[in-house]
Amino acid sequence: MSIGNKLYLNSAKKQGSVEIDQQLSRLEDDIRKLKIDFDIYFNGATKRPPLEARARLEASIKRMADNRNMSFAQRYYMNTLVSRFTSYRELWRRTLRAKGEELT
């Protein structure tokens, strides 16, 4: 393999790594925004729970979980975000059930 090919592959790996970092950052922001949306709903400011946003976030998590190009650190961070989302999701489910609403 030539030096040019090695440099290109290293550059592509770094670029892919930066892209994954950006996706993880976006995922963290989306989780934070969804938590805020549910807090607003539970405080009575909106009439409907943000279930569509939750479904989009779940799809995004599934799509990112299939990415095999993550480093160990990125995978750890991803698992931390998924764990945080799962705990929020369970809290929202219990709170909705306590309010007497069905989760669709």
Image: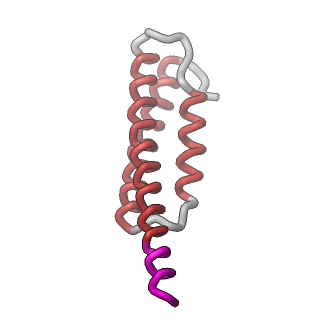
Between residues 53 and 100, which one lies in front from this camera angle?
A: 53
* Image coords of residue 17 (percent x, y): 43, 62
Which residue is depicted at the point 57% across and 19% down?
101
Q: Judge whether residue 8 is colored magenta.
A: yes
Q: Which residues are magenta?
A: 1-10
Q: Which colouring convention does the figure follow? A: secondary structure
| Residue at the far bottom in the pictured view | 1
Between residues 63 and 45, which one lies in front from this camera angle?
A: 63
For the stretch drawn in magenta, the main secondary structure is helix
* Image coords of residue 10 (percent x, y): 43, 74
Q: Judge whether residue 86 is colored magenta.
A: no
* Image coords of residue 57 (percent x, y): 54, 39
Q: Quadrant of residue 79?
A: bottom left
**Does residue 31 lie above or below 41 as drawn?**
below
Q: Quadrant of residue 3?
A: bottom left
**Does residue 9 lie above or below 19 as drawn?**
below
Between residues 67 and 62, which one lies in front from this camera angle?
A: 67
Which residue is depicted at the point 53% across and 54% down?
64
* Image coords of residue 4 (percent x, y): 48, 81
Which residue is depicted at the point 45% across and 25% down?
95
